[in-house]
Image (tube, grey):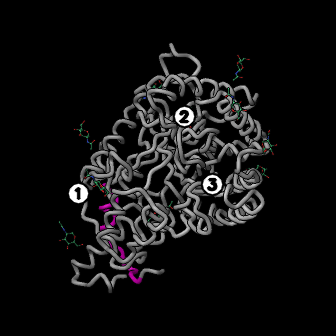
Amino acid sequence: MRRRYAASSLLPLLLTLLVIPLSFGQSNDKRTLGSSEPIRGVNLGGWLVTEQWITPSIYDSTSAADEWHLCNELGKEKCLSTLNDHWNSFYTRSDLADMRTAGLNAVRIPLGYWAVDVQDYEPYVSGQYPYLIRAVQWAGELGLSVVIDLHGAPGSQNGQDNSGLIGPVLFTGNTTNSDRSLGVLRNLTEEFSQAMYNDTVIGIELLNEPRLNSGSFTMVDLQAFYSNGASTVHNATTSNAPNVTIHDAFWGPQYWKNYYPTDSAASQPANGLSIDTHQYYAFAPLNNLSHAEILDSVCNISQLLKQPSSGIPSTMVGEWSLETGAPPTARSSSQDGSDDQARRTWFRLLAEAQMVAYTPNGPNQSSIGWFFWAWKTEYDIDTWSYRRGLSDGWIPSDASNTSTYAFPVLRDGCVDTTYNYTAPLVAGSGIGGRQAASWVLLGSLLGLSTYLIW
Ligand SMILES: *[C@@H]1O[C@H](CO)[C@@H](O)[C@H](O)[C@H]1NC(C)=O
Ligand SMILES: *[C@@H]1O[C@H](CO)[C@@H](O)[C@H](O)[C@H]1NC(C)=O
Ligand SMILES: *[C@@H]1O[C@H](CO)[C@@H](O)[C@H](O)[C@H]1NC(C)=O
Ligand SMILES: *[C@@H]1O[C@H](CO)[C@@H](O)[C@H](O)[C@H]1NC(C)=O
Ligand SMILES: *[C@@H]1O[C@H](CO)[C@@H](O)[C@H](O)[C@H]1NC(C)=O
Ligand SMILES: *[C@@H]1O[C@H](CO)[C@@H](O)[C@H](O)[C@H]1NC(C)=O
Ligand SMILES: *[C@@H]1O[C@H](CO)[C@@H](O)[C@H](O)[C@H]1NC(C)=O
Ligand SMILES: *[C@@H]1O[C@H](CO)[C@@H](O)[C@H](O)[C@H]1NC(C)=O
Ligand SMILES: *[C@@H]1O[C@H](CO)[C@@H](O)[C@H](O)[C@H]1NC(C)=O
Ligand SMILES: *[C@@H]1O[C@H](CO)[C@@H](O)[C@H](O)[C@H]1NC(C)=O
């Protein structure tokens, strides 16, 4: 949409000057993404590992709540045809092109072990791999880097739907499970470190969201797996290995200070190791915070990860969203708030506070960037769909260009939550950013209604 104003004002310029630049150098070398250029990415959630709440239509004809039971109910043949259609259509090249247009530079791709290694007794079907390869090729062509994440391990590492199988955590119940997982990690490293992929894959994440307990899955067990996993990835290639990324197991990045998976006596983190931490306000115990407390907590994490040379390894916030208060359900689409101006104003603040918090703003920081969960859902739930936020106006139109952000950044690297921004009256109608806010302000100074401006 074209703006009707040709006249310019000093106001946007003055407001722009309040911002401290976020990026501290650009690089065309993909392997340095995260070190010289912040990661700004999205998850391809619910794609190669399905989740009922992300794509309810796939599950509608069944009583299943996870992919294991989905395929168990449909049978392998029907499940394969259903999922083939989904793999082929849910993410296309044009989705990745749209991400690039939105200023994103990376995607995180969750994968289940069964894409590489499925046993006859397991109901899962395999066939994801060609789609993974195709996505990595598209990403490479479009200038997006990729982190591949082992989201589901045999036995399940967290007992949740996102691992493929709801139930007890049996990952450590049988050494076969870790051996099979290492085989998958070896496969992924061998495949994507080949020269033909041009270093598009910058990280292999060993295990998503392991849920530890004091009995059968302890931190000692997890670190034994991480040691083997890191060693497996390093041994699997003689060329430039992708980084080894480890999830913090919800213990926080600070727990992993100076972590070196194959040397417990190390006094600094391993080179090429990064931490993935997930920052959600939708789940207990952080689901009952007030807006002010959420923003305070986001700023605290920002400051932790922005301390230079803290010994905390390079850290990405590999998952975050705009949901607060309650976990998602398939019916979350009814939350659509595109006509609620106050809600859209809050989303914009929460989105920018997190984008700024999870982006490094100086040298030697642990912070290396972020991945929103997710680019889309079947019904583009307000709080979980990045592209919904883009189209309805609460996500800045170009994540890499801070001039499209509405809120100024303070000296400590946190967003100025007191800045008086109000979302446009009509969802998606604004140009966004401080310039939009200042046009509204200018309009009200001139006694115009915001309708006239938009
Ligand atoms: C990885 O596994 C896939 C799926 O089974 C297979 O097609 C591919 O050849 C394997 N790649 C390597 C390098 O082993
Ligand atoms: C790698 O580079 C070659 C040559 O420029 C190109 O044809 C190919 O599409 C690229 N692949 C990826 C995954 O970037
Ligand atoms: C581990 O699980 C496999 C099936 O995945 C089974 O064949 C094997 O007997 C189990 N081993 C032990 C020690 O339980
Ligand atoms: C990786 O290679 C080293 C040196 O050859 C070896 O000691 C180690 O056991 C290997 N790691 C794995 C997981 O195979
Ligand atoms: C990869 O590791 C290097 C060296 O430790 C680090 O600077 C970089 O930020 C990491 N990137 C990712 C994507 O993990
Ligand atoms: C926390 O929030 C949930 C969801 O909104 C609500 O059901 C629950 O009662 C709240 N718990 C407390 C302790 O306030
Ligand atoms: C943020 O950190 C401050 C100072 O350490 C602490 O007092 C406050 O409780 C923290 N806020 C949240 C929400 O964690
Ligand atoms: C960053 O680290 C390098 C190498 O350790 C050091 O020379 C430099 O002074 C550090 N810069 C800051 C701002 O801490
Ligand atoms: C950044 O965004 C501003 C505001 O929309 C725009 O004027 C400027 O051209 C953009 N810069 C780049 C490099 O895209
Ligand atoms: C915020 O700006 C709006 C105009 O956009 C104005 O009506 C409102 O009074 C301002 N609120 C505060 C607290 O300054």
Q: CA distance from mark 3 to mark 1?
A: 48 Å
Asked if the residue at label 1 sits under 8 Å from ligand 10, the reply is no
Dot placed on the residue nearer the N-terminal end, 2 or 3: 3
Query: Do callouts 2 and 3 mark residues in contact (Cβ within 8 Å)?
Result: no
The answer to whether residue 402 is above or below residue 200 is below
Asked whether the viewer can see residue 36, the reply is no
Q: Position of residue 279 (x, y in %)?
A: 41, 46
Disc 1 residue type?
Answer: Thr
Which residue occupies the foreground of this view, 270 or 158?
158
Residue drawn at 55 percent across, 56 percent down: 104
- Which structural element holds mark 2? strand
Q: Which mark identifies residue 69?
A: 3
Q: Position of residue 83 (x, y in %)?
A: 70, 61
Under mark 3, the amino acid is His
Q: Helix, strand or loop at disc 3?
A: helix
* Highlighted magenta segment, given as a residue range: 4-18
Residue drawn where x is 44% and y is 63% of the image: 396
Q: Position of residue 433 (x, y in %)?
A: 38, 65
Residue holding disc 1: 418
x then y, percent, for residue 212:
47, 33
C-alpha separation, residue under disc 2 versus residue under disc 3? 28 Å
